[in-house]
Image (cartoon, grey):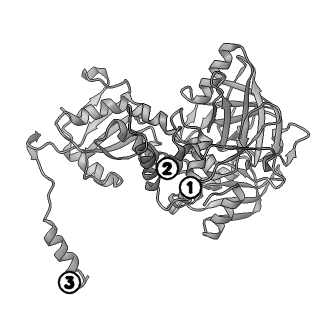
Amino acid sequence: MAFKELSGFLSRLEEEGELRRVTVEVDPILEIAEITDRESKSPSGGKALFFERVGRSQFPVVTNMFGSRRRICLALGINDLNELSIRMERLLAMVRAGTAEDRIKSMALLPEFARFAPQPVAHGPCQEVVESGLDLDDYPILTNFAGDGRPDHDGRFITLPMIITRDPDSGRANSGMYRVEVIGKERVCIHWRESSDGAGHWRKYRERGERMPVAVAIGGDPAAIYAASAPLPESLDEMGFAGFLRGEPVSVVGCMTNGLKVPAGSEVVIEGSIEPGESCLGGAFGNHTGFYDPPRESPLMRVTCITRRKEMIYPATVVGSPPMEDCWLAKASERLLLPMLRLELPEVIDINMPLEGIFHGCSIVAIKKSSLDHPREVMEAIWRGKWLGSARLLLIVDADSDICNISQVAWKVFNLVDWRSDLFWDPMTGKNIPLGRLGLDATRKAGNSHGNVEFSAEIGRGESIVETVDRRWREYGF
């Protein structure tokens, strides 16, 4: 099902018993974040929260929309996250020639993908109201943690935006999800990652000495929101990918002051620009690691226009120590990454990025092992690549391992790793491992001595006895 707007998705969540309304007045400064944090950490991710009465603002706030496996699947119109891997594999299979990188680049040219390119429209719900004044204090932008922000401000961050920028060379648009810090009624600080497409565009404008147009679109179709967070190849347009996910193109409308195109179904759009070289010292931010990111110099965007829906809903996400909503956005991305990783490393059977690793901290990789040195070779190839290259800890296990069962993975690490030969780290070991990375080979090593114990095959009783006991289980009185 393609949701054209946020309200349609929220209605579906309510029908499915996945949304809880909070009718008493709440404060966007810390209170909503504390409530959301407790709900996110309840069994199965709790429910999406719709705060009807928010102090300091006329607009309601929704949080934790994607905060469970079931809700992220509802958002993307699938029954299981593995469907994302299947759809990506089918798309990649249509491009047979060339290297893995060539095939990924060619995906964007496939008719199966190109037919979902964003569709321009003359008018959109996101422009029903053009604000007469430029005052971000009118909006219920959250403060998540007591230490957030600069000392002279209350630490309000826009945490679920689609940041729209355009490459000045190619004209190609990008939609990325980077946090936006409010530092004034008409000024925000954009904290994008140095390696992101948005940051790359900014450097090009800065080198040219040109003003950079930027749009911050908030809310709208859940597939478009997710696509802004996904680690897609540069060749894939995020809005086109959102259309591919939802089975229907995303409608986009031109901004009123800077020429960029934004999702027409957004709830609110903040238009603006960054002057060449203009920046500001942003404040600290309580990130998904559970620790504060320190203050850093970031581009300063000056707001030129704010448009919104008449009946606007403000969506936000609250990050922090897991489990939180962003963990499930990352789980969806994990399923999309798997087919692209397999293009380069077909021996990879599956991957698991545990919630506790916050996506980049740890990756467990199951492989079809062909030689004693194979796990190390896979580690080095992964760290050279772009898909899991930032993983600080890589655990390589056998193809038949249940990598989503952390207890089983720990059992294999504790019992199969020879710390003399199966541990790989930076150049101190003489291996081709990047600084700050650690790899563990937790695969079986037939005939290899581990201390005083020799391991070969995993224990088992055989399929016939398992089938017999399954058949007679009730007979035993259980």
Quarter of the picture containing the N terminus is bottom right
Q: Is residue 469 visible?
A: yes
Picture coordinates of residue 120 (x, y %)? 73, 42
Of circles 2 and 3, the one toward us is 2
Q: Name the quadrant containing residue 74.
A: bottom right
Q: Is residue 388 above or below residue 37?
A: above
Q: CA distance from mark 2 to mark 1?
A: 9 Å
Work out whether mark 2 precedes mark 1 in sequence or the reverse, and give the earlier one.
1
Please give the residue where the numbered disc 3 appears in the rendered image: 476
Numbered disc 1: secondary structure: helix
Residue hosting label 1: 76
Q: CA distance from mark 1 to mark 3?
A: 45 Å
* Residue depicted at 59% across the width and 46% down the height: 115
Q: Nearer the viewer, residue 181 or 149?
A: 181
CB under 8 Å between discs 2 and 1: yes
Instruction: Tell me the quadrant of the picture where the C terminus can be found.
Output: bottom left
Q: Nearer the viewer, mark 1 or mark 3?
A: 1
Residue 327 in the figure: left or right of residue 125: left
> For residue 133, what is the image quadrant?
top right
> Is 296 left, or right, of 188 in this rendering?
left
How far from the left and from the top, in percent, is residue 183?
A: 76, 32
Which amino acid is tagged 3? Tyr
Q: What residue would you read off at disc 2?
A: 332
Comparing marks 2 and 1, which lies closer to the viewer? 1
Report the amino acid beneath label 2.
Ala
